[in-house]
Amino acid sequence: MSTQPINNGIPVIDLSPNNLEPGTPTWVRTREDVRRAMEELGCFQAIYDTKAAEEIHSDILAAAEELFNLPVETKSQKLSDKPYFGYFGQHPSFPLYESLPVDHPATVEGSRGFTDAMWPSGNLKFCQSNLAFSKVVVEIDQLAMKMLTESYRIKDSFYDEYVKSTNYVLRYFKYKAPKEDEDNMGLASHTDKSMISVLHQNHVNGLQIRTRNGVWVDADFSPSSFIVMAGDALMAWSNDIIPSCFHRVIMKETGRETRYSLGLGSIVKGTLQTPQEMCDESRPMLYKPFDQFEYLRFYESKPDHKPECPIKAYCGI
């Protein structure tokens, strides 16, 4: 079986490349497991075991620690005009939390450009670690999307265009351990604005997923595991068949270790619309065509009055 009902009810699916060959019975079973998990929970835990998995895991977490040890002035540099593509930290509402994004992280140019901005004299190890890890999570993102489009019998041209036109961003996250008198909320409940998010972390847990019946469950990780999560854009693309996944971070243990994690997000360039294959008489089209970057700007423009369901407020019919 490709799925095991463990991790507090979060499906665990083996996506390791040596176990999957398109068109084989294992591929088809795994593809349907991915679809079912996304429809029921909006996420699953992916096992992506390769020969280099442990080395990539240790290298990227060392890179995250090195990055956040830089001065705030360095981390706060404006590197992009895109919404939510900047440093976040030192915020009174989220004192435990910092994040920093890398645009186009799976390209040599993107990885090198970010590295040179943070370390003008260069940091080859960071650049290589960022690039190697980013290529892995992009592979996971594209594998999940390929399985979903196949399962829903979406035209191949959509997946081909998805691979060509997607803008990836890799976010580094740091969550300080709270002091005894501090709130343990690392990051409040939210959904991502991406198509798909792929999350990874060190050994310090804290991520919680909200099930459809409103119960929060803990997500546990191993060095070769990732949480694959549906964002608002995927919910709109799927015509509400796949829910965007509510999640939060709770730092339960006071005075202990720092939590480092990473999240890859996918943003499709240009106009994104719900495929006709996701609609029928019983489920008419629920969303107008939209631009993901414009959706991010819409969300950014409402810092104090977020709609209950932002994607429906932005482009719902």
Image (spheres, rainbow, N blue to C red):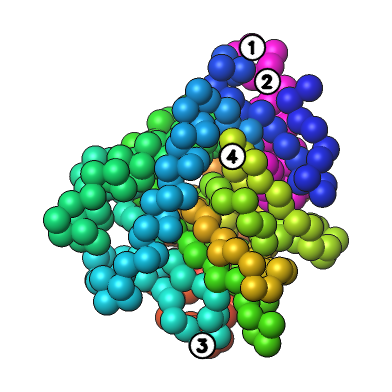
Per the model, the C-alpha gap separating discs 2 and 3 is 48 Å
Check disc 4 and report the residue beneath it: 223
Which quadrant holds residue 24? Answer: top right
Crowd band around label 3 with a 10 angstrom C-alpha radius: few (<14), some (14–19), many (20+): few
The three-letter code of the residue at mark 3 reads Pro
Q: CA distance from mark 2 to mark 1?
A: 6 Å
Element under disc 4: loop
Q: Which residues are magenta?
A: 22-45
Residue 158 inside the magenta-drawn segment: no
Q: Is residue 184 above or below residue 104?
A: below
The amino acid at mark 1 is Thr
Upstream in sequence: badge 2 or badge 3? 2
| Mark 2 in CB contact with mark 1 (< 8 angstroms) | yes
Tell me the residue at 57%/61% (across/down).
259
| Residue corresponding to mark 1 | 24
Q: Residue at x 24, y 44 (%)?
A: 124
| Numbered label tally | 4
Q: Is residue 105 above or below residue 304?
A: above
Which numbered mark, 4 or 1, is in the foreground of this view? 4
Query: Residue 28 — which label?
Result: 2
Amino acid on which disc 4 is placed: Pro
Q: Are marks 3 and 1 in contact (CB under 8 Å)?
A: no
Q: Position of residue 5 (x, y in %)?
A: 83, 38
Distance in Å between CA atoms under marks 3 and 1: 52 Å
Circle 3 residue: 92
Closer-to-camera residue (304/55): 55
Q: CA distance from mark 4 to mark 2?
A: 26 Å
